[in-house]
Image (cartoon, rainbow, N blue to C red):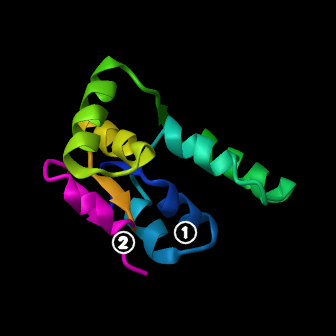
Amino acid sequence: MSGGDFLLDTNIVLYLLSGEKKIAEVINHAQWHISFISELELLSFSSITSTEKEAIKKFIGRCRIIDINREIKELAIQVRKSTKLPLPDSIIGATAIYMEMPLFTADKDFKKIKSLPLILFEA
């Protein structure tokens, strides 16, 4: 599969940055999107080196960052209430629903969101 738009979960970005070729093949010709939550998560790891931070920033620069809005907030509330997912995951899932694009993730917990188009990566 290639082409199209994807919302990339934080874990997919980490796999990709660590050299996972299968992910690179899937998203090769796609437009990459990430939630502002993933941007915060990626840049706030306390143990990242300056080299890793620069690689993350370079990758983020190639992505469209989706910020929160009223509709995503409302969807995130619904997702959180119905699934009990952590708030960051609820926001990421709600963002994918709002944007009407599949979430590419390695986190099986996202299966709890029935209306979420999902591409599940298994290493």
Q: Viewed as shown, does residue 89 lie left or right of 43?
A: left
Quadrant of res 14: bottom right
Are dots 1 and 2 in contact, CB under 8 Å? Answer: yes
Which residue is the site of mark 1? 15
Asked if residue 7 lies left or right of residue 50, the reply is: left
Instruction: In this rendered view, identify the residue nearer to me: 122 or 82.
Output: 82
Q: Which residue is mark 2?
A: 121
Q: Nearer the viewer, residue 95 or 65?
A: 95
Considering only order in the chain, which callout, 2 or 1, is on the residue closer to the N terminus? Answer: 1
Q: Is residue 24 left or right of residue 120?
A: right
The residue positioned farthest toward the right in the image shown: 50
Question: Magenta span has 119?
Answer: yes
Residue 84 coordinates in the image, percent (x, y): 29, 50
**In x, y percent, where is residue 45?**
70, 54
Looking at the picture, tell me which residue is in the foreground, 92 or 84. 84
Left or right: residue 109 compared with residue 25: left
Residue 65: assigned label: none
Q: Which residue does the image show at 33% across and 18% down from the upper left? A: 70
Task: Categorize mark 2 by other alpha carbons within 10 Å: few (<14), some (14-19), many (20+).
Answer: some
Query: Amino acid under label 1?
Result: Tyr
Kind of residue at badge 2:
Phe
Q: For the residue carrying disc 1, how many other residues have a C-alpha within 10 Å: few (<14), some (14-19), or many (20+)? A: some
Q: Which residues are magenta?
A: 107-123
Quarter of the figure that contains the C terminus: bottom left
> Which residue is found at the position 83% from the left and 57% from the top?
51
In front of the other: 15 or 87? 87
Quick check: is 55 in the magenta stretch?
no
- Helix, strand or loop for disc 1: helix
